Amino acid sequence: MSSDKIDISESPFTPSPVLPTSFEGDKVIQFQCRKGIECWNACCSNIDIMLTPYDIIRLKKRLGMTSTEFLQTYTYPFEFGRNDIAGVKYKPVEGGTACQFMRPEGCSVYEDRPTACRYYPVALLSLRRADEFTDRQQYALVQESHCKGHFEPRSLTVDEYRKEQGLDEYDEHGRAWRQLILKKKSAGPTVGNASQRSLQLFFMACYDVDQFREFVMSPAFQDVYDIPAEEQAKWSDDLDMMNFGFRLIRQVLFNEMTIAMRPDAMERRLARKKEREAELDRIVEKLPTEEFVKPIPEEEKYDKYKFSDS
Ligand code: SF4
Ligand code: SF4
């Protein structure tokens, strides 16, 4: 078992208040959460929960909505890293801090609750050392004063706790996303327009799987990328779509070329762009500018800022 000082900023999840020591899965912890405990629902009453792409797929499926609808109703976007990595957090109840899925009897989406809820009070740290090429999972303990589960007489290893919480599946489907975040954190910052576009692509591909599906099926995308029909047939499956999204991000942001592009795709795209610009120029030339660009009289310039109490 190793015991390292941890760099909390490396965790893809909200890490506070994490005890400042990390450990591996064989660490024994004392913990049990059970109905009837005096702090029942305390952890869900004041939330700060980041969602993984797989969490969103599980939840939107359970609620019978599209990822776009789910994101709008239950989440809000935020940026982290050097502010160029898009993330999604649970939106609490209107005017409060509690989770929208909290009920007096417990979690109303329990079987599909997100990774962070399953791990609690363990924090997952996806760490990569300078001399290592892949990340490795380490853990830390979150000890909040309101959580009385730490005083329950039950001891088990973190590995046993992960198994009990069904985390193998969540970690398996979350790994590619966590690695993407680590890679993006260690890459140089993107600036200006590129940063905005990469943020938008990252957001859509990672979190809005249904909108991403529409995007990759569009003629504009198909015109550039050459994807075999048998691969596209798998895109009806959300997990396959999600994993294709990770590949596309790695290709676009880190030049890891795994998706074939059509020959001359970029040239044709540029030519079309030029054609559109030329067409716009031709239209603008024909506009009777004197009529459309009438100077605004000085006395009317501030009309739209004028306060009116009528
Ligand atoms: S999803 Fe469930 S477990 Fe997680 S914060 Fe909400 S109510 Fe609590
Ligand atoms: S024991 Fe901890 S995890 Fe369980 S309900 Fe109480 S605060 Fe939440």
Image (cartoon, rainbow, N blue to C red):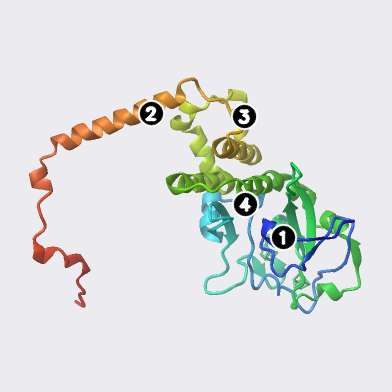
Disc 3 marks which residue? 258
The alpha-carbon separation of the residues under discs 2 and 1 comes to 44 Å
Residue at disc 4, secondary structure: helix
Amino acid found under the numbered disc labelled 1: Asp
The alpha-carbon separation of the residues under discs 2 and 4 comes to 36 Å
Any part of residue 66 in sight: no
Disc 1 marks which residue? 7
Camera-side mark, 2 or 1: 1
Amino acid found under the numbered disc labelled 3: Thr
Q: Residues within 10 Å of mark 4 (few under 14, many from 20)?
A: many
Q: Are marks 2 and 3 in contact (CB under 8 Å)?
A: no
Question: Residue 279, how many percent across, how many down?
Answer: 24, 31
Camera-side mark, 4 or 1: 1
Instruction: Indicate if the residue with disc 2 has its beta carbon within 8 Å of ligand 1.
Output: no
Disc 2 marks which residue? 270
Any part of residue 50 in sight: yes
Camera-side mark, 1 or 3: 1
Q: Is residue 254 or residue 116 the one in the foreground?
A: 254
> In the rendered structure, which disc, 4 or 3, sits on the residue that comes first in sequence?
4
Q: Is residue 27 or residue 1 the one in the foreground?
A: 1
Residue at disc 3, secondary structure: loop
The alpha-carbon separation of the residues under discs 4 and 3 comes to 25 Å
Camera-side mark, 4 or 3: 3
Q: Quadrant of residue 161?
A: bottom right
Question: Residue 178, how many percent across, how many down?
Answer: 68, 48
Quadrant of the rendered image holding ligand 2: bottom right
Q: Are marks 4 and 3 in contact (CB under 8 Å)?
A: no
Residue 56, numbered label: 4
Q: Is residue 197 or residue 225 the one in the foreground?
A: 197
Residue drawn at x 9%, y 51% is 294
Residue drawn at x 77%, y 67% is 20
> In the rendered structure, which disc, 4 or 1, sits on the residue that comes first in sequence?
1
